[in-house]
């Protein structure tokens, strides 16, 4: 089983790329933070990322989704990983919790994800959503924090440059094919 992480700048089109990969037959796993935010907002909580338990809730859902991924495909593509959650904690100025530290140790030690991470670069803008309330300039800072976190844990970033969606999906697919044994 080869598990690849698709990560990068907020608003860069990761979800759209993931959908394109799913249409090509890849097994994909959606982002956990967005799901945690959407669930809380559906219950009337406007800014769940301000809650002290937010980071650990994201970590828990990421772990659940990684373990539940059916594994019938030789390749899985994950929209973000616990290393992204580490970057988020740093970006928000939150302490890195024991749960997050433990999960990163697990994924690194057990080599859960491939060391090559598909890093989706910004499109030159960032549109806010209910879950993503970040300016383009802030997204660029967050992009730097993401890259630093992945490198700190020994991952190699493979750039997926700004381009047409179809070309980006094809580029990710080509990288995965090239890296496969």
Image (cartoon, rainbow, N blue to C red):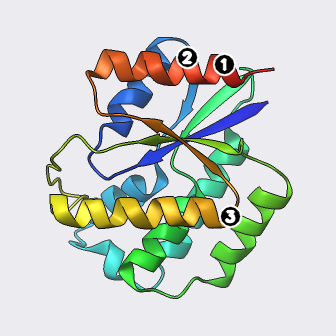
Residue 40 visible somewhere in the drawing: no
The reply to whether discs 1 and 2 touch (Cβ–Cβ < 8 Å) is: yes
Residue 41 located left or right of residue 58: left
Q: Quadrant of residue 167?
A: top left
Relative depth, front residue between 154 and 107: 154
Residue 57 located left or right of residue 165: right
Residue under label 3? 153
Look at the numbered disc 2 and give the secondary structure of its residue: helix
27 versus 90 height, above or below: above
Residue under label 1? 178
Residue 44 located left or right of residue 85: left
**Which residue is most to the top?**
24
User: Residue at coordinates 35% horizontally, 43% vertically from top-left?
Assistant: 121
Residue under label 2? 174
Residue 179 located left or right of residue 95: right
Q: How crowded is mark 3: few (under 14 residues within 10 Å), some or many (20 or more)?
A: few
Instruction: State the count of labels.
Output: 3
Instruction: Name the quadrant of the C terminus.
Output: top right
151 versus 78 height, above or below: below
Q: Could you say where residue 7 lies in the image, as x and y percent from the top left?
A: 47, 46
Relative depth, front residue between 100 and 164: 164
Residue 51 visible somewhere in the drawing: yes
User: Residue at coordinates 32% horizontally, 73% vertically from top-left?
Assistant: 48
Q: Could you say where residue 60 lies in the image, as x and y percent from the top left?
A: 61, 64
**Mark 3 or mark 2, which is nearer the start of the sequence?**
3
Q: In which quarter of the image is residue 68?
A: top right
């Amino acid at each position: 089983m080869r598990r690849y992480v698709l990560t990068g700048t907020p608003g860069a089109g990761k979800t759209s790329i993931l959908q394109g990969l799913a249409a090509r037959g890849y097994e994909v796993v959606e982002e956990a933070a967005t799901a945690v935010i959407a669930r809380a907002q559906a219950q009337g909580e406007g800014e769940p990322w301000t809650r002290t338990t937010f980071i650990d809730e994201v970590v828990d859902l990421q772990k659940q989704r990684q373990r539940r991924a059916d594994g019938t495909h030789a390749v899985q593509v994950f929209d973000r990983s616990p290393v992204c959650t580490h970057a988020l904690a740093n970006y928000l100025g939150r302490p890195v919790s024991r749960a997050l530290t433990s999960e990163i140790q697990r994924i690194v030690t057990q080599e859960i994800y491939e060391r090559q991470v598909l890093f989706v670069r910004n499109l030159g803008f960032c549109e806010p959503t209910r879950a993503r309330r970040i300016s383009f300039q802030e997204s660029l800072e967050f992009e730097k924090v993401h890259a630093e976190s992945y490198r700190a844990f020994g991952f190699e970033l493979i750039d997926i440059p700004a381009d047409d969606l179809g070309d980006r999906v094809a580029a990710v697919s080509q990288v995965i094919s090239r890296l496969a044994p």
